Amino acid sequence: MRKREYMLGNGAIARGIVEGGAQVISGYPGTPSSEIIGTLASMKERNFYVEWSVNEKVALEVAAGAAMAGVRSIVTMKHVGLNVAADPLMTLAYTGVKGSMIVLVADDPSCHSSQNEQDTRRYSQFALIPCLDPSTPQEAKDMIPYAFGLSNRLQLPVIFRTTTRISHGKSDIELGPVTQDMPAADFEKDLEKWVMIPKNARVRHPHLLKLQEDISRELEDSPWNKLELREGANFGVISSGVASVYAKEALLRLGGDASFLKIGTYPAPENKIRSMLQSVDKVVILEEMEPMVEEQVRMIAQEMGLHVDIIGKMKGPVPRINELNVDVCMDILSGIPEAGCKPEVSIVARTESGGCGLELPQRPPVMCPGCSHRATFHAMKKAFGKDAIFPSDIGCYTLGILNGAVDTTLCMGASITVASGLYYAGEKRPICCSIGDSTFFHTGMNGLLNAIYNKADITVTIVDNRITAMTGHQQNPGMGKTVTGESTVEVSIEALCRGMGAEFVEVVDPYDLERTEEVFRRARDFKGTSVVITRQACVIDAKRVGVRRKPFVIDTEKCTGCRTCVRLGCPAIEFDVKVKRARINATCTGCGVCAMMCRFEAISEVKK
Amino acid sequence: MSAKGISDFDLVIAGVGGQGTILASDIIGRAAVREGFSIRAAETHGMAQRGGSVVNHIRIGCTLGSMIPLGGADVLLALEPSEALRYLDYLAEDGVVIVNTEPILPVTVTSGLCSYPDVGEIMASLQGKRKVVGFNATQLAIEAGNAQAMNVLMVGAISNYLPLSPDIMLDCVRELVPPKTVDVNVRAFELGRAQNQV
């Protein structure tokens, strides 16, 4: 038996990347994809190049360049990252690759950590390139070396789509052999293939269309599609990706009788779908999010002139939103008489508090105790006033929604641009947006350049906590460190802003509330685009590198119970309703911001 | 209950981001693999880790999906009392809930937006619905040497129910906790295991 290890799905994918002999790996962090590059970069022995790129478009182009040179490359990102990288992807499908290239995209059905739940499989349909969709972490690992091979045979980039439950699932993983054969970089000049001027693009587009048959043929009999026709069964289940294991379990639990087609590739295997449709009268399609398989099944049925009853999400009870699970699949299957489910199996409904009727408090994610963003937002709101508009961006600071400092969040980088649009629309209220350091490097820079160039009278706050925090503390260009911990140039955000023409650029420590508020007031009064950089290391990272501050304590004699500190929303500050006094709990990290706010000088550092 | 042919043992771990639910499931997962089981687990990462409500599913002897259906778990291991109630529907009618009685107040409560139910009432509600093993695991972890070892203490408590050797689980504790904290965590595991010998 081969060696088995207990691994995170993303760890298994990283292992697949090593087994498949990847040579250039790039990506931008994004839940649920981030641990793949993190795992690869922390490996002690590496025979590949790995980087955190500044955004997904950059990352995809880096991987594309490597694949043009004939080596194996992979780029990783979350689903919305592919929107940023869609420009190079669509044309890369025309040029194709010389080596092999995987575009790994992690979808997040149910929006566990995302602003939308778009379905990446649609991009493969749009770009006319193959897509693989694993059902388990083991399959995910095994699919990666296959995807490199497929990409090389077709000379096309291949989309590898994982989801939260694969990437953040854990499983015993059987390891496979590591590819030893590494092609050497050898870029061949070939203007007709690599230079997409109109003349060449007009040739490559029909070429890509012609390749579609090859793609279908390759995928049809790949190990990722499995058809089990049950003798005598007139009902079938077609299921794809991670939903296929839920569907399987639901059938087992309900004792249903059905033929089963498991799909792991797109385009879906046409011949297998035909066989299924010919052998049953009714079929249910269980897939997460968009009706990709369903559309294909309906087209095939129509083409064959078959009158099979097709149940899915276009017509039927399968939800088009959120992730699926065993419960949802059981609910759907038990409503189909032909599935032959045992009637005695009861289906449980989820309640708020185990059906006991107690009202449980909501427990939303919040900024950490001592997080400098909280201080920034406090000073910002004091300087700009409640009426001001606060567009924001994507990162830990989005949690400032609880602090009344986040009025818009659209996508990465959209704080500065939305702020600009509000200003150009004629909004008279002061506008102050917030964006993190990594998000600024990602796509905020372009927005700032545009704002300065087009004279937007707004304030741009760059909340610089010296790391890409929300996704799990990845390196970025402001840190002077690469993904592997190697020293590199530390890009100065203030120099960048000045270089782009900003005339008001101030750097301030947000823990110094008074000065921060004063800087915000001047920024507010400045005519034109002003930039305030609030710089203070992320508390989690600071703790890791050994920063220790003395915690604070509240003197109950001096505390009047005014709740000013409580309203800051720091998890370290509690209000004791019985004695009507605030108190500081053990999670205090000693930032001292509450002490600066207290008018009664009731909060002080613990003396030891 | 875990169903034959699907899974040998289904466990849901509920808690609050920062309590160490991931380490708890890692100890169990690694031990299960060492014992030759196939295993599936689902975790909460990302945004929900910032002090939010978190839930992990662990399925021992399972080759299907990682998500346990409602009413399917053999044991619910709750690191915080209100989180036990929040995920109680995952527990089978005849399942057991092991719960740390030390509450963690969410910011919605500390800032006065809503209230936290009385812990006695939570325990009574749990007892009205399922078999309950409840104790203050945070206090016991402090006695073992560190409040942070509460997660390992709770793993010790669940070890009485798992189809896994406690010695192998202890080996995994030693491998997975920070080297300086091995002794504290081993003590915590044993203290937890003593809470509900079956």
Image (cartoon, grey):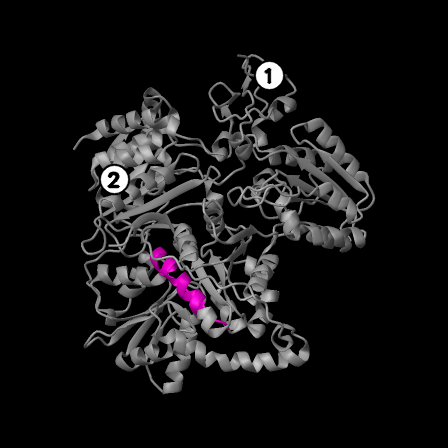
* Residue A419 image offset from top left, x and y in percent: 71, 50
Looking at the image, which is closer to me, A330 or A179? A179
User: Given the image, on which type of amino acid does mark 2 rest?
Assistant: Lys
Looking at the image, which is closer to me, A5 or A509? A5
The reply to whether residue A442 is visible in this rendering is: yes
Q: Nearer the viewer, mark 2 or mark 1?
A: 1
What is the crowding at mark 2: few (fewer than 14 residues within 10 Å), some, or many (at least 20)?
A: some
Residue located at (42% from left, 52% from top):
A10
User: As drawn, which residue projects farthest toward the bottom?
Assistant: A305
Is residue A148 within the magenta segment? Answer: yes
Q: Secondary structure at mark 1?
A: loop
| Residue A370: quarter of image | top right
Q: Is residue A67 above or below residue B145?
A: below
* Residue A280 image offset from top left, x and y in percent: 27, 78
Q: Is residue B138 above or below residue A298?
A: above
Q: Chain of mark 1?
A: A
For disc 1, the marked residue is A602
Residue located at (51% from left, 27% from top):
A572
For disc 2, the marked residue is B129
Is residue A457 left or right of A402 when viewed as pictured?
right
The stretch in magenta equals A129-149
Identify the main secondary structure in magenta: helix
* Residue A456 image offset from top left, x and y in percent: 78, 51
Looking at the image, which is closer to me, A394 or A365? A394
Is residue B71 left or right of A416 when viewed as pictured?
left
User: Given the image, on which type of amino acid does mark 1 rest?
Assistant: Ala
The reply to whether residue B102 is visible in this rendering is: no
